[in-house]
Amino acid sequence: MKSQDSLFITLEGGEGSGKSTLARKLTETLISLGYNAISTREPGGTKLGNQVRYWLLNRDSDVSLGSISELLLFLAARAQHIEELIKPALDSGKIVICDRFNDSTIAYQGIARGLGAEIVENQCLFACQGVLPQLTLFLDLDPRIGLERTKKLSKDSAKDGVMDRIESEELAFHDSVREGLRWIAKNNPNRVHLIDASQTFEEVLQNSLEIILYSLNR
Ligand code: Z5A
């Protein structure tokens, strides 16, 4: 195992942009190169996170949710995720790759749901208590392509093309998420690296690895 400093990496992008596949492959590759790396996702990563995930995403759940409750549930799951998993892993020198984090909350709840980017960013900062990503890979993709990939994936996995509560929002909502993520990338050029997710998966993986290895060896 290489001696290394911890690194907190987040993956952001719309539905079907390839984040989960990339998180898996990056973790495997970094481990094969001798790094101590783990991957996790939001909402999720803890028992509370997985329960909150069910309420937030399952279309069959009979829990009704307004935009503010939705925001606070994402943040409750995040606070627990940081305390229970992310911070201990970073404190022990690991590379943590997290599929979605604060930028999703700012883009989905702050911008697309209309709660306000600044107020949501401040709420995120409160929930994170100083544990913030050093590097973010933003997989930028037209939502039309991403949603097609997701539909195909759910068909292939015998879910009969059923989309979750947020996936099934209007296309305009997903366009607004993409614009939001682009705006965040433009305002955080040192942290956020935009990757063209319409490339082949191998190209996306290669671009991502170059950015991470550069960051680790700096
Ligand atoms: N959300 C929120 O509103 N606020 C928040 O604060 C947070 C989240 C944290 C989480 O859903 C939902 O919660 C999400 C945002 C919201 N909204 N929705 N819906 P999730 O975790 O279930 O799903 P997701 O994050 O949207 O991911 P996804 O739909 O599973 O997509 P993905 O992870 O980006 O893609 P993938 O599963 O890796 O790939 C999809 C398919 O495309 C698969 O068959 C791959 O093999 C294929 N693929 C991947 N890359 C490529 C390339 N380059 N070319 C061709 N095909 C590819």
Image: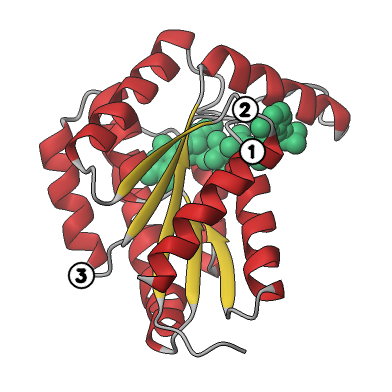
Q: Nearer the viewer, residue 56 or 125?
A: 125
Count of numbered tags? 3
Estimate how packed mark 2 is, as few (under 14), some (14 to 19) or many (20 or more) residues with alpha carbons within 10 Å.
few
Q: Write the residue at 57% across / 12% down.
A: 144
The residue that disc 3 covers is 129
Residue 211, given in percent of the width and then of the height, sits at: 45, 54
Residues marked 2 and 1 touching at CB (< 8 Å): yes
- Dot 3 or dot 1: first in sequence order is 3
Q: Nearer the viewer, residue 35 or 182?
A: 35
Residue 195 seen in the figure: yes
Q: Residue type at mark 1?
A: Glu
Q: Write the residue at 56% across / 58% down.
A: 50
The residue that disc 1 covers is 203
Q: Residue type at mark 2?
A: Gln
Disc 1, SS = helix
Q: Quadrant of ligand 1?
A: top right
- 165 left or right of 172? right
Residue 154, given in percent of the width and then of the height, sits at: 77, 29
Q: Write the residue at 48% across / 10% down.
A: 171
Rounded to the nearest angstrom, the CA distance separating label 3 from label 1 is: 35 Å
Q: Residue type at mark 3?
A: Gln
Does the beta carbon of the residue at mark 1 sit less than 8 Å from ligand 1? yes
Disc 3, SS = loop
Q: Nearer the viewer, residue 105 or 138?
A: 138
The residue that disc 2 covers is 199
Estimate how packed mark 3 is, as few (under 14), some (14 to 19) or many (20 or more) residues with alpha carbons within 10 Å.
few
Does the beta carbon of the residue at mark 2 sit less than 8 Å from ligand 1? yes
Rounded to the nearest angstrom, the CA distance separating label 2 from label 1 is: 6 Å
